[in-house]
Structure formats: structure tokens, C-alpha cells
Amino acid sequence: MAFLAAVVEVVGRNKRLMAALGAEVASMPKPHDGPAREHPLYQSWHGHITRLLREADPALDAELLAGLLLAGLQSDPILRLLERGETDRLAKAVQTLASGLLGS
């Protein structure tokens, strides 16, 4: 959960950078000309969260759940929340989701 909190902090501090990341991904030549999930930064975050979830509970569909946790950070409502400076609120919500997944 500490890693997820750190991801939220990075996204909160760098919301313009994250928006630019979406634009960059759209203009990248192959093999990165697909969606944001093909970007090396996303793949790194996704892989790490997947490993953490698998370690915590091997019965979870860790790959899918990692994608779901990260997908929300790219949504318009979340970006608007971050623009208002509500990073702490988002971090708490993500922590609640992760705790629910892990039954803690």
C-alpha cells in the first residue's frame, strides 16, 4: 500500500506531467504507439503492484486488479480532484480499495 500511496503522490505532484504522458504515448512510434498501458512507466508501476498483490494474496487476479487500481488515476474525475489539490483524499481512497482487496 505504501507503493500505491507513492504513485498517488507522484501523480498529484505531476498532474501536468501525467497529462503530457498521455499525449506523448499517442505520438510515440511503434512499439509504443498504443494506449498508456504500453508506456514503460505504466508497465513498471503495473508490474510492481501486480507483484505486491500476488505476494499478499496469491488467490487474487493481481494483474487485472493492478490495472484497475492504476486506471482510476487516469480518469477525468480523478484528474479534476488532483487539480483541486485533493491528493490526500485520493491516497486515502486508494488505500481503502487496496485494504479491501487484501481483507485488511
Image: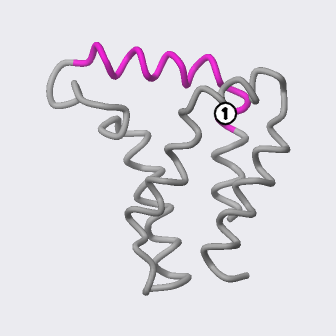
Quarter of the C terminus within the rendering: bottom right
**Quadrant in the rendering for residue 82:** top right
Magenta segment boundaries in residue numbering: 10-28
Q: Residue at x 43, y 39 (%)?
A: 41
Q: SS for tag 1?
A: helix
Is residue 52 shown above or below 34?
A: below
93 vs 43, nearest the viewer? 93
Is residue 66 shown above or below 38?
A: below
Q: Residue at x 80, y 37 (%)?
A: 87
Residue 11: % across, % down: 65, 34
Is residue 79 rendered to the left or right of residue 27? right
Is residue 18 rendered to the left or right of residue 11? left
Is residue 28 rendered to the left or right of residue 47? left
Residue 32: % across, % down: 23, 29
42 vs 101, nearest the viewer? 101
Q: Residue at x 14, y 25 (%)?
A: 30
Residue 29: % across, % down: 18, 19
Q: Residue at x 59, y 39 (%)?
A: 73
Q: Amino acid at mark 1?
A: Ile
Quarter of the N terminus within the rendering: bottom right
The overriding secondary structure of the stretch rendered in magenta is helix
How packed mark 1 is, by other alpha carbons closer than 10 Å (few <14, some 14-19, many 20 or more), is some
Whether the magenta-drawn stretch holds residue 14 is answered as yes
Which residue corresponds to mark 1?
78
Is residue 84 shown above or below 98?
A: above
